[in-house]
Image (spheres, helix red, strand yellow):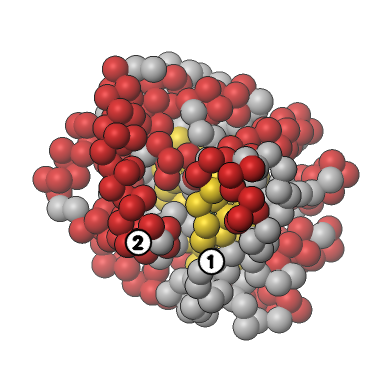
Amino acid sequence: MSLRSGVLDAGYRSVVRPVLFRAHGGDPELIHESLIRVLAGLGPLQRSALRLLSGPPTSPVTVAGIRFPGRVGVAAGLDKDGVAVEAWSALGFGFAELGTVTALAQPGNDRPRLYRLRASRAIINRMGFNNAGAQAMADRLDRIGVRRGASTCGLPLGISIGKSKATPLSDAVSDYVTSLRMLARYADYVAINVSSPNTPGLRTLQDEGLLRDLLSGLTHEAAQLAHPLGPVPIFVKIAPDLSDAQLDRVVEVVTEHGGQGIIATNTTLARDGLAPADSVHAEQAGGLSGAPLTGRALEVVRRVAGSSSLPVVGVGGIMTPDDAVRMLDAGAQLVQLYTGFIYAGNALVAGINARTQGRTT
Ligand SMILES: Cc1cc2nc3c(=O)[nH]c(=O)nc-3n(C[C@H](O)[C@H](O)[C@H](O)COP(=O)(O)O)c2cc1C
C-alpha cells in the first residue's frame, strides 16, 4: 500500500466511515444522498485541497479514441443525476460514468430499496432507475459548460442511459434514442444499460435480435448527430448472469453493430458468497454488488477480452487495488468502482492509482 493510500485508508475506516454509516439512523440511501450533496457542494478551493490529498490519476490510456488520465472510474449509479460531476476528479478518479438516466424522469422503486451487507462487504439494491430524466442532466451539464472532448470537469464523462419504466419494451429503441439525442454532446461515451435487474424486462434487451435493433438504432442516431469528433462511442453494459454462449453472442452483436466497448459487469441476481451475518438481507430482491461479485465479474471480463478486440471496462467487486490489477491483467483497459468506494473511500482510488502507475497495457 502506498503511503498516501495508507493514510487515506486509515482516515476513512477510522473516522469517515463510522460517522457516515451511522448518520441518518444508518439508512444507506439517505447517507448516500448526503454524501453526494456534500461532494456537490464543494467549492473550487475545497476541491483543490481534496485533489492534493487524493493524488492525481496515473497511467493514462486511450480507449475508443478517448484519452483517459487514469484507469479507475466512477461506476454508474453513484452519481445518477450528475450533481457531483465537478468533484470526481478531485477524488483521484480518471473518469466518471453518470446516470443511469432515462428519457422520462421517474421516482424508481419504493423505499427501502438499498441494503448494506457489511459482513460480506456487499450491497443489494433495487433502486429502479430513480432519476430526474435525461433533459435535467443535459441542462445541468450545459450550465457547467461540459462539452464532449473538453474534460471540463477534469476527466472524461460517460453517460449511462436506460429505458424509462413507462415505455413498453417494444418502444425501447426510440426511448434510448431520445436520451442519446439529448445527451450525446456532453458525453465522451454513452453507455447503454441493458443489464440492470431492477427494470422489468430490461435484461431481455441483451438478447440477440433486440440488442441488434437497439444498437443499430443508436449508432445510426449517433452518426446523424454530426459532431466534429465523429459519432459518440457507444459502450454496452452487460450482466454477470449471462451464460458463456450468451456472452459470446452479445460480444458478436456489439462488434457487428458498431458498439465500441463492453462494460462488464452490472450487479448479479445470484446470492453466492454472502456471510451468515447478512442472512437477514440476503433474500431482498435486487442486484448484489461488492465482494461476492469479484470472481464472476473477473471471469466475464476475461472471456469478453479473450474473445474480441473490443475494449473492456471491468467493474464488479473491485474492493482492493489487487482486485483492480487482476481485472486489468484479465484484459480490461479501465476499471470502475461502486461498492468498493463505499466501503474504502478514496483510499481505494489512490491505491489503484499507485498500483497502476507506469502501466502501459
Ligand atoms: C445502489 C446502486 C445503484 C446502481 N445503479 C446503477 C445504474 O443506475 N446504472 C448502472 O449501469 N449500474 C448501476 N449500478 C451497478 C454498478 O455500476 C456496478 O456495475 C455494480 O455495482 C458492480 O460493481 P461494484 O461491485 O463495484 O459495486 C448500481 C449499483 C448500486 C450498488
Which residue does the numbered mark 1 point to in the structure image? 113
- Percent x, y for residue 321? 48, 25
Task: Give the residue displayed 44% in from the left and 54% down from the top.
Answer: 78
Q: Which mark is residue 336?
A: none
Q: Which mark is residue 25?
A: 2
The type of residue carrying mark 1 is: Arg
Q: Quadrant of residue 275?
A: top right
Is the residue marked 1 within 8 Å of ligand 1, measured from its CB? no
Q: Quadrant of residue 313?
A: top right
Tell me how far mark 1 sits from mark 2, CA to CA.
Answer: 16 Å
Label 2 crowding class (10 Å Cα cut-off): few <14, some 14-19, many 20+?
A: few
The type of residue carrying mark 2 is: Gly
Q: Residue furthest left?
A: 45
Looking at the image, can residue 350 be seen?
Answer: yes
- Helix, strand, or loop for circle 1? loop
Say which label, 1 or 2, has the lower sequence index: 2
